[in-house]
Amino acid sequence: MSEHAVCPSPGVMSQALAKEVPQEEGEGGSRRSSWGLLAAAGLGGTLVALYAVATPFVTPALRKVCLPFVPATAAQIQNVLKMLENRSGSLVDIGSGDGRIVIAAAKKGFQAVGYELNPWLVWYSRYSAWRDGVHQNTKFHILDLWKVSYSHYRNVVVFGVPQMMPQLEKKLEEELKCNARIIACRFPFPCWIPDHTTGEGIDTVWVYDLKGSRGCETKSLEITPETES
């Protein structure tokens, strides 16, 4: 080394290091900030997706009468089809869920319609009907069952819950025409006397036929007589 070479003093070295360290820390902080923003965006997107998927399933539980989705069993479907033998015309499934009853009825020649509040289930039902080749004989609507008129249906299938049956019983009796057939699954109507019953346990179905001719003035079903208290 030359005799005239000057070694940097400790003070100069300290200043140089002080300039380099903040720059490195600044770059690391910037990277951490970017990862934080990405994590927050990912979490936000996940929550939005979960909300979009879960809302159609949770919302019915917030209604006065909750009608949860419980898929029909194979035995239930067979019992319903058995009670539809020798019948024809239009059919409606009230609370059609994933469309199993509607699709099974369409395969038997019915013009079948399903009403369901959950849009995901309706879209899946439409896909299933297309996949099974009966989309031309089926329709699925995203509608509240209480806002639908059932007056033009000859066959009605209901997968209900006990809380809704009294009100639905009254609605159907007021709207349906004579010779209509109502098939209740899982829970019977509280006042009507069933004309037929088949199945056991949760697979039981109750059948109610409106009495009289198509042009009759009274189209009431038989009502269970009230007992004196």
Image: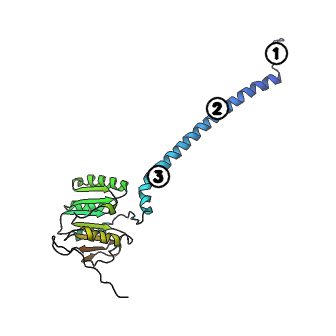
Callout 3: few (<14), some (14-19), or many (20+) C-alpha neighbours within 10 Å? few
Q: Quadrant of residue 205?
A: bottom left
Q: Is residue 190 left or right of residue 49?
A: left
* Element type where label 2 sits in the image: helix
Closer to viewer: mark 1 or mark 3: 3
**Residue 214: where, in percent of width, then height?**
16, 70
Residue shown at 53% from the left, 42% from the top: 41
Spot occupied by residue 226 in the image (x, y as percentages of width and height): 32, 84
Q: Position of residue 5 (x, y in %)?
A: 81, 13
Against 169, is 28 above or below? Answer: above
* Percent position of residue 164, x then y: 37, 69
Please state which amino acid type lies under the numbered disc 1. Answer: Val
Q: Is residue 46 above or below residue 160?
A: above
Q: Residue at x 18, y 68 (%)?
A: 87
Q: Which residue is mark 3?
A: 51
Q: Which mark is residue 6?
A: 1
**16 with respect to 174 (left or right):** right
CA neighbours of label 1 inside 10 A, class few (<14), some (14 to 19), many (20+): few
Neighbours of disc 2 within 10 Å: few (<14), some (14-19), many (20+): few
Quarter holding residue 178:
bottom left
What kind of element bears circle 3?
helix
User: Farthest residue toward the front?
Assistant: 217
Can residue 79 be seen here? The reply is no
| Residue 25 visible, this angle | yes
Placement of 9 over or under 49, stated as above or below: above
Q: Which residue is mark 2?
A: 27
The span from disc 1 to disc 3 (Cα, nearest Å) is 69 Å
**Location of residue 216 with respect to 145 vertically, above or below:** below
Residue at mark 1 to residue at mark 2: CA–CA distance: 33 Å
> Identity of the amino acid at label 3?
Tyr
- Where is residue 180, by image quadrant? bottom left
Going by the numbered disc 2, the residue's amino acid type is Glu
